[in-house]
Image (cartoon, helix red, strand yellow):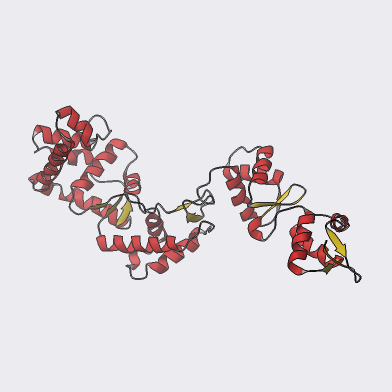
Amino acid sequence: MIKLSFQPKDVTKKLLGGLPGRSKDVLTKRYGLGKTTDRMTLEAIGREYSITRERVRQIEEYSLNTIRKSDSYKESEKAFAEIKGVVDELGSVVSETNLLDCVSDNQNVRNHIHFILVVGDQFFKFKEDDNFSHRWVTDKNLALTVENSIIKLCDGLTCYDIVPESELIKTFMDHLKDISSKYKTDETVKRWLALSKKIAKNPLGEWGLAESSNINVKGIRDLAYLVLRRHGSPMHFRELSGKISDTFKKKVHVATTHNELIKDPRFVLVGRGLYALKDWGYSAGVVKDVIRQILEKDGPLNKEDIIKKVLKERYVKENTIIVNLQNQKAFKRDKVGKYYLA
């Protein structure tokens, strides 16, 4: 938390002091500067004064411009400069939420700081759009560079990508070659990444596209995918259930985990209760199906080669594979002992 040397409420009181009654009241209600911290809409204020939404907007704009030309604005220069220093310290481009979080967790104080940002001509607000959240800027050129770099970063990702934070930061840095070295810190870069609505972090701190189920985790199957992927090898559903509980501090029932794994095509049953990821090259189906897929791909093979290939796909006993090969409706054996599809 960044501690300010002044009380934001005292600054806004001074700034509002020279306004006529209705102008002061409109700004107070619009920005939640009174007894209530709720910010009223133009329509709501208009209803109170029996005027149009557009008229309220005009009063707001006129009042803000009046403050900027007032003596109280000049007298508050130190406060504006201190807030600018905070924005610059946070990277000169920072999301509104992140900025306010760094200064106060009190909503009343946050509203007064927000008002100072709105009034101050050192600050530029870039409104929320499809790609980015609301953000405050003290360097417009830097802001455009950062945003263009984030868009390029997003364009290089697919819904399947899960990227370690260190790797994502390095890639992002590569897009930011021409910026000042003072901004090239992990903390600043992470704040810039947080501007984006297109990328996000999953519960394990890995990055990817926000729309991906690997990042925007919604249920047990998504948690299971992350845990199994990190584990790197097949796991029994009971062990996987326990690992999910330990990793995410979330109570998970074994039966629920098993049911979710069965439903999701990302997981492949490779043995008795053992699950692997399809991403690892495992194919779905029982042993007979695996043998069929191998023979379709490689043509006739002897028993030993079939066993080796099946064991790469399934954690089963060799005898189980031999029993399946004896299914004459599915497989035949030629004169030299090689099996082929019936």
Residue at (19, 35) in percent of width and height:
28
Which quadrant holds the C terminus? Answer: bottom right
Residue 273 appearing in the image? yes
Residue at (59, 51) in percent of width and height:
226
Residue at (33, 65) in percent of width and height:
182
Is 112 drawn above or below residue 319 in the view shown? above
Quarter residue 333 falls in: bottom right
- Residue 195: x and y, percent? 37, 53
In the displayed structure, does residue 33 sit left or right of residue 322?
A: left
Is 340 drawn above or below residue 237 in the view shown? below
In the displayed structure, does residue 286 sit left or right of residue 198?
A: right
Is 164 drawn above or below residue 32 in the view shown? below
Q: Nearer the viewer, residue 151 or 120?
A: 151
Q: How many marks?
A: 0
Residue 14 appearing in the image? no
In the displayed structure, does residue 296 sit left or right of residue 261?
A: right
- Residue 273: x and y, percent? 74, 47
Q: Nearer the viewer, residue 95 or 265?
A: 265
Residue at (76, 69) in percent of width and height:
298
- Residue 325: x and y, percent? 86, 58
